[in-house]
Image (cartoon, rainbow, N blue to C red):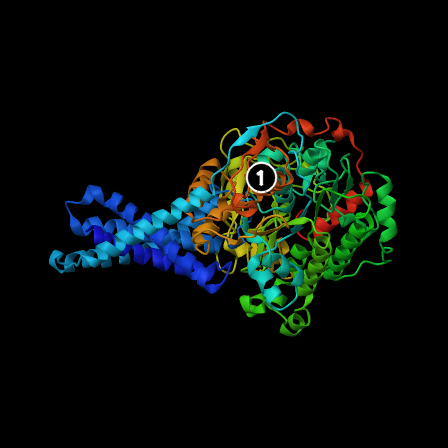
Amino acid sequence: MVRLQARSAFLIALAYVLVGALRWHHPLGGSADLLARLAAGVGVVGNLLWLLLVALSLPLMRWPRLALGLPTALVATCAVTGELAVGWNVDLPFYVGPGDPERLITLARGLAYALPLGIAAGLLASCAAKATHPGRVRRWPTILLALQGCCTLALVGGNAAGLRALPLEAVEGSARSPGVQRKLTIFCIDAGLWTMVDHFIDEGRMPHLAALKERGSYGHLMTHGRRLSPVVWTSMVTGMAEAGHGIHDFTVLSDDGEGRSLPTPSTERTAAAVWNIADAAGLKSLVHNWLVTAPAEEIGGVVVPNLKSALGGSIPATHPAAVRSLVADALDDSPDERPEDAYADITRLLEIEIDAWEAVRELADFDLVVTGTQASDSSLHLRYLDTFPELFDLEAWGADTQRAAQRSNDVPAIFTRIDEWLGALTAEGRAVLVVSDHGARPRAVPLVLFHADALLADMGLIAFEGERLEGSALDPKRARAREAGSSATRHRVEILFREEVTEGVEPMSLAEVIAALAALTVTETGEPLFEAAGPMPEGRRPEAFVIPAPCLSRPPGEVSVEVAGVERPLARYLDVRSENSGNHDPHGMFLFAAPDVEPVGPVAALCSETSLSTLLGFTLGTSRTLDRVAEAARRLGLFEPYTSLDVTPTALAYLGLPLARDMHGRVMERVLGPTPRARAGVDTHGGLLDPDRRSAPIDEAARAEILEQLRALGYTK
């Protein structure tokens, strides 16, 4: 029985790992390394499934066929459900949590597909149990299973030992370790992913990164939490998760009572950044073009905030203030008219970022340089289909193949220019840590935005100042309910409800509003507009939610919907963004190279190509329970060893600066070298933040330009 269970477990594991490798192929190292890790992955997953099958069968041992068939059916069903759920989740927004109704619907759909396959697997296992006679079973399978079990235990043990957190030696203050004189550059390539970067390296487009790879250590850097750039960029320079550093989005709401969206200021950050820690130790830092750094902090160095506003001719305020004019002198004059093609803005902004860096790099002998660019991410959003058309259903996208061919070099050109910048950075001889906040991959279907406000207005539930829906503010005096969420499809749209309405407006209860929303259907097909509609848990605001149905996540065609007795085209509520073909991936990248650290080459989990790694990437940082599961899987070798939280602890350890015990990240010990050594540590770096920084003035011109660009990319309304 146990041997039959082992065979079932390893067949399921083999299929699962192979399917995962084909679907989520993010290779590191050569083909031999990949095959070895896949084999190790089958061993680890197979042993886990074997133990699970044995545990599930114990209560059923009186019925041998049932004891083998039922657990096999359950395990196979769960594996297929997980694989399908991960595949469908590629277009679920990053802010949809694991307990959200939308994810539960996705899991239910996966279960509906997987259940027949699981039942079939269980029946086959049950038939095998009946057909196998104990006398026919030889001893060699048992010996092989025992050997591979020992090998798996050795692999897991070695992996866990390599990921152990070394002890912190308590120190007073923020002084640098004696005798350490190292210098470091942290460089972020937004949306960098090894699968794509290696493709450009093989084409000879990124020689400087290729050279770093030859003399460095590198691997996947899993995004911890939401794959939203300001959140992850802040996590990377603080070592803290979102809840610890206080940056939650590109924008915040104004506190003047008007509820306006404003670019998130650096004063919202509640955790010390790596440059604050370096400043406390007397080191000079250059912080250049990093997200959420305006208004500029006063440190013993230079701060040039994110330069997006420079496209509109507004240079952000810097520290010291005199640097602002130095940066302005280095930039070209703004054109009289902005180009219609957003790609031209992306290339120009990248040149602005490089020119600004050239203008300030010689101001001091900086111990720490922190810089990066979003040009890579922005170009991939716009041109992923043009760059890798073989990954898309071109007919479904309505792609113009001739135009795609003309633009096929746009993304590679951006990465080549970034590589040239990286070459200039590394020519200084300092250590370099290249990171990305997340990866990139093709969007499965065109992005379709659902404008809930327009629908609510046509239903008479909200009103606008004036008659136009676009460009007009909601009139709170005439609003019965209003949208509280984003307009993107395939997530829960939350609705604020007001019992009191203006005189002369017919009152509606919350139940009537929900019923009206749930009753909306597409006229031609009868499809519901919403998969679910209901009240929120008692005591929570917003009071109601709806989950858009699939018909609101695809191009509307010629269909219509009856709203408040009027037939209206469904296209009125949908905005198809066929130009946005790139999506975020939970696999980011890191590369560390230093003249005084021996490189180790690729650093990867045992079976990082399985969909389990991707599934954990989707949920990492969304709940403590799932984080504990991810940590266990990481120790087993089923998950990438490092996340975006580990960038700052690693940088501090290399620079000889003290870590903080309240940091959520850990040092990349495998990357910094094989010699174990205790780290200096303090309880917290929270006291390094200037308590008066919230009173820093806001640059209104820069703020307006940044908001406009965020709207153009679909990050905010």
Query: Looking at the image, can residue 122 be seen?
Result: no
Viewer-side residue, 693 vs 686: 686
Question: Which residue is located at x 64 percent, y 71 percent?
Answer: 400
- Residue beneath the point at 65% across and 49% down: 432
Q: Quadrant of residue 323?
A: top right
For disc 1, the marked residue is 495
Q: Residue at x 23, y 45 (%)?
A: 57
The percent position of residue 605, horizontal first and vertical second, equals: 46, 51
Indicate the position of residue 277 as horizontal and vertical percent values. 68, 34
Q: Is any atom of residue 512 visible in this view? A: yes
Residue 578 percent across, percent down from the top left? 62, 61
Does residue 404 sit above or below 632 in this rendering?
below
Q: Nearer the viewer, residue 283 or 335?
A: 283
**Tally of numbered discs:** 1
The amino acid marked with disc number 1 is Ile
Query: Label 1 crowding class (10 Å Cα cut-off): few <14, some 14-19, many 20+?
Result: many
Q: Is residue 436 above or below residue 211?
A: above
